[in-house]
Image (cartoon, rainbow, N blue to C red):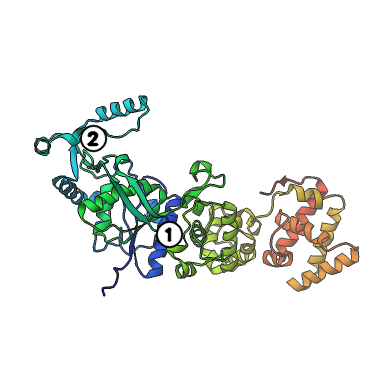
Amino acid sequence: MASPPRARVRFAPSPTGYLHVGGARTALFNWLFAKHIGGDFLLRIEDTDQTRYDEKALVELVADLKWLGLNWVEGPEVGGPHAPYFQSQRLPLYQEHARKLVDGGHAYPCFCTTERLDQLRETQKRNNLPTSYDRLCRNIPAEAARQRVAAGEKHTVRLKVPFHGDTVFKDFLRGTITYQNRILDDLVLLKTDLFPTYHLANVVDDHYMEITHVLRGDEWIPSTPRHVLLYQAFGWEPPTFVHLPVILGPDGGKLSKRKGAASVGDYRNLGYLPETLINFLALLGWNPGGDEEYMERDRLVEVFSLEKINPKSAVFDEKKLEWLNGQYFLRRDVDYFFPLVKPLWVATGVDGNAFPESYFRTAIGLLKDRSKRLPDFITYGMYFFREPDTYDEKAARKYFGPGSETLLQNLHDSVAALPHFQTADLEALYKETAEKLAVKGGDLIHPTRLAISGIPFGPGLFELMMALGKDTVLRRLNAAAQAVRSGQIRTAVTV
C-alpha cells in the first residue's frame, strides 16, 4: 500500500499592505502543521494585482515572517523545485491553462467592455437584483469567439459554471458544504491584460506546487466552490480545505488598524517579543486542551493539530497579549535582552560608551522582571543613566512633604558614613534607622526610591542603590533634599 504524499502547505500573501495579525495567524497555523507532521511550508507571493502591488509591503512582509521565525523551505530567497514563487513570473502557465479550459468547454472568452459591465451593475442595483454577470458572451458560438480572439479583440476569460446542480466540498473543520451552482457567477479567470485573477492562479499553483492542505481564512469559503469547479475541469484532485476562524477585536468587530495596532510590525514596534506573538496567535482559535497558556515554540510544534482548531471566531485580547509578554520577560535572561534593549537606550541619547557593558546588563537584570514590553526599559529605567529632573507628582505630594528635607539629609549622611556600600549593609542601616526614628521601613524606603529614581516603583531599593553606586545615590539624595528645601520640586505624572 502506497504511503500518503508528504504534507505540503503554503502561505500565499498579496504584497499590497502590512502583514495583518490575521494573516500572520494563518501563516503560523500552516507552519505549525508542517512542522508537527514533518511536512513542507512554502511561501508564495501572489502579486498578480499589479495596480495594488507595493514593493515596500513585500519587503516588510518577508521581514515580519522572518522576525516571527516562520521560515519557509521553498519560496523567495530560498528557491526550490517549483520556482518561480512570484505569480507575476508565472504568467505563461496561467495563460496556457486558461486556453485549456476554453478548449475543453469549461470557460469562454468574454468581450464585454468595462462600460457595459458598469451599466449592467447599475441596472441590477436599481431593480434590487443580485449584481452578477449576465453571461451574455457565453452564448457566442465557439468558432465565432475564436475568430474574435484571433483578430486581437480585447477580452477576458470566464469560468463556465454549470446552470444546475450543486458543487460540494468538505471543509476539515466544518464538514460538508454545499453550494447551488445557480447562485455562482461566471467569474473572470484571466483579465484583459493576460494576468490571472486570484482564483485561476491559486488553483494552478496549488496543483503544481503539490499543496496537500490549504489553510486559509474563512472569508475564502464562498470562493471554494469555484475553485472546486476548476479542479474538476482540470481533472485534478483538490487539496484538503481548512478554513480558519476569523479574529475579532475586543468589541466584537473586525480587528483593524483604525482601532489600534493590527499588524505584526505594530506589535514589534510596541515592544512585544516574536515568541510572545507566536504563542498568543496560536491560541486564537486553537487550544491543545487544558489550561496551558505559556507555550514555547517547540511545545506548540509538539502538540499542534488541526483537530483542535475551533471554527468559531476568536477575540484578540491585548491585555492577555501584554500579560503573556510579561511571562516571556520573566523567563528570558539578560543575554537575551542585552542586544534588544541597549540600542533602545542609545537611541534616546544615552552614550553607549560612557557606561561599561556590565552596567547595562545590571540595569536590564533589575528591570526585566517588572517590564511587560521593551519600551518599559526606557520609560521606567532612564534613571540608570540620567539624574531624575522630575518626580512623580502623586508620590512627591506623599513623600516630599514637611519634614522630608531633614529625613533625606539624614539618610544622605548615614549612607555616606557607611564603611561598606553593600546590599546587606544598606538593609541593616535602614532597619536600624527606622527603629531609631520609630517609623516603618516604608517611610524611609519610599522617599529614598523617589529621590534616586524619580518614580515610586521599580527594583528592590537596596539592589537599585548598589547598581547606581554610592556617589550617585548620595548626589541624588542631596539634590532631592535641596529641591524640597527650596520648594522647587518639578513633578510629572508617571505613565
Quadrant of the snapshot with the N terminus: bottom left
Where residue 288 is drawn, which disc sits there? none
Q: Position of residue 39 (x, y in %)?
A: 34, 67
Residue for point 51% across, 67% down: 296
Q: Residue 463 or 332: which is nearer the viewer?
A: 332
Q: Position of residue 372 (x, y in %)?
A: 60, 58
Q: Whole-percent x and y of residue 29?
A: 42, 60
- The residue wearing badge 1 is 28
Name the amino acid type tagged 2.
Answer: Arg
- Is 100 displayed left or right of 211 in the figure? left
Quadrant housing residue 421: bottom right
Can residue 421 be spotted in the picture? Answer: no
Query: Quick one: 473 or 212, which is closer to the camera?
Result: 212
Instruction: Indicate left or right for 332 with 90 as reference.
Output: right
Question: Identity of the amino acid at label 1?
Answer: Leu
CB atoms of marks 1 and 2 within 8 Å: no
Decide if residue 186 is on the left or right side of residue 405.
Answer: left
Q: Nearer the viewer, residue 486 or 463?
A: 463
Visible residue check, residue 93: yes
| Total numbered circles | 2
- Side (left or right) of 268 relative to 415: left
Circle 2 sits on which residue? 135
- Residue 360 against residue 88 in the figure, above or below: below
Residue 375 % position (x, y): 57, 54
Q: Residues within 10 Å of mark 1 (few under 14, many from 20)?
A: many
For residue 153, above or below residue 173:
above
In the image, 383 versus 213, the foreground residue is 213
Q: Secondary structure at mark 2?
A: loop
- Marks 1/2: CA–CA distance: 40 Å
Q: Count residues near mark 2 (Cα–Cα under 10 Å), then give few for <14, some for 14-19, many for 20+.
A: some
Mark with earlier residue (1, 2): 1
